Amino acid sequence: MHFPYLKNECIFAKDFKEVHLISKCLIVKYMENISPQSIETVIAPRTIPTLEKGKIPPQNLELEEVILGGMLIDKRGVDEVIDILSDEAFYSPAHQKIYAAIYKLFKDSQPVDMMTVREQLLKDGNLKEVGGGAYLVYLTEKVSSSANIEFHARILIQKYIQRRLIKMSNEIIEEAYDDETDVFDLLDSAEGKLFSITQGNITRTSESARELVIKARKKIEELHNKKEEFSGIPSGFTKIDELTAGWQPTDLIIVAARPAMGKTAFTLSMARNIAVNSKIPVAFFSLEMSSIQLITRLIASETGISSDKLRTGKLSDDDFEQLNKKIQSLLDAPLYIDDTPSLSIFDLRAKARRMVSKYGVKIIFIDYLQLMTANTSGKIGGNREQEISAISRNLKALAKELDIPVIALSQLSRNVENRPGHRRPQLSDLRESGAIEQDADIVTFLYRPEYYKLNTWDDTEQTPTANQAELIVAKHRNGGLDNIRLQFVNGVFSNLSNNFSLQQEERQQIQSYNSRYNDQKDEVIPSPTSIPKGNIDNAFESKSINPDINF
């Protein structure tokens, strides 16, 4: 075949495929208003790999061409690799620019093909730098389909990871030679870089408002169509989950209280609910209690067998039967406990990264914050307030880095004990550092008036405080505040609503009957707890009533 309008020469095609390629190139060159040239000069030369320390970095330019060609001719190819590749995964600068154009079109919900990518490159001012539209034609001719494109992309990622490891190693070597660099900061930095590589953390450092709005809208739509009731990780406590929509990724949640309020019991109940009921992997860092003590507590709450019996081993045959029956749920639970004492923030971050990578952990509990130490670099200078500030700041950074919620327990100052009346904690009571309040997304306080010998709540109904606790949500960066009452029996927290409503209903009915028989002094009312629900009428019809009993 021959093209008479070429300057001073003609091109002869050997077969139909070459005719197809030449035709595409000429059309593209015509659209670019550039004089056609021979195909050999139209196609941009392959990038020559640069030498680093005398060696060529790991790369595969031909594979890059195949991947880009597959994305240009088949939308399915784009869908398969767009979430696992970034422009940096490509070694050739020209290929990086082409992929960036494809990525931008995809994010804007625009079609991706040879012509749309050409227009995007032209708009970005990169068309000539990548070799013009003719180079896009060349890429499409490299492949006939997008088959195996994901497999090819995985190979490309391996090459990219190799280059990142080489770069990271060189940076660490250079920093290690600097005597002014703190060794613990160097270790933390090195592990952070390595973790980002092992996680395949191929992300952009900044995004435009348009990209973020599209991403937020997509997330809202996903939440709208989601079958689960809450967008975050459910705590297992109804009122808490209704307020927070579950514990959200990147959030730092503080659970603070005075000693003996049940901080460990509360977080252990949450960890159990998440791991056992929701089957979500949980990491629990216990700096105060051993892992055996914690799991014994869980077994006690799961089986109903007292902790004293479990500690002493004085179990009956029925207890053993109950034990064997109930512990199966704990055996299968994705709960991982670390009881390293005096854990430093550096060690915690390292362990947390490994747990997320190895076990897929989705939420972290820390018991408790004041028992942690900052990195032993000597920079804190013995100032405990600055040390706690550094710890809380690093916990928030860890939550963002791992994209999971981190729940940390905290002690309160003694100011609570000196407060008159109901000794509800306040934000100013957070011990040793106001930075905890600043860094945390949610700050909660556990409060049990029964501990202070207060028999009724300070509400209009004068509700009894026995076996009840209150979770005070004092700060909630992305939501409302509330005081949520919970049931606390034998060291186990649970929802209050059902038991509380039943208790109220029985008391009201008994008081009603009490008024009907207030003249009968010689009869005895049975205890409310001994009356089966629904049989209260029958109990009173027996006229075994004593109005002197105080309910």
Image (cartoon, rainbow, N blue to C red):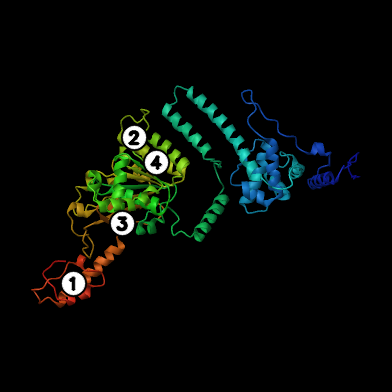
Residue contact between numbered discs 1 and 3, judged by CB atoms under 8 Å = no
Residue type at mark 4? Leu
In the foreground, 474 or 369: 369
Q: Which residue is mark 3?
A: 494
Earlier residue among tags 1 and 2: 2
Of the numbered discs in the image, which one, if any, rests on residue 373?
2
- Left or right side of 433 for 97: right
Is residue 363 positioned above or below 344 on the image?
below
Earlier residue among tags 1 and 4: 4
CA–CA distance in space, label 1 to label 3: 27 Å
Residue drawn where x is 66% and y is 47% of the image? 102
- Left or right side of 361 for 56: right
Q: Which residue is mark 4?
A: 395
Is residue 470 positioned above or below 35 on the image?
below
Percent position of residue 544, x then y: 13, 73
Dot 3 surroundings within 10 Å: few (below 14), some, or many (20 or more)?
many
Percent position of residue 540, x then y: 18, 75
Disc 1 secondary structure class? helix
CA–CA distance in space, label 1 to label 4: 52 Å
Residue drawn where x is 19% and y is 54% of the image? 421
Q: Quadrant of residue 21?
A: top right
CA–CA distance in space, label 2 to label 4: 12 Å
Disc 2 secondary structure class? loop
Is residue 177 positioned above or below 478 on the image?
above
Earlier residue among tags 4 and 3: 4
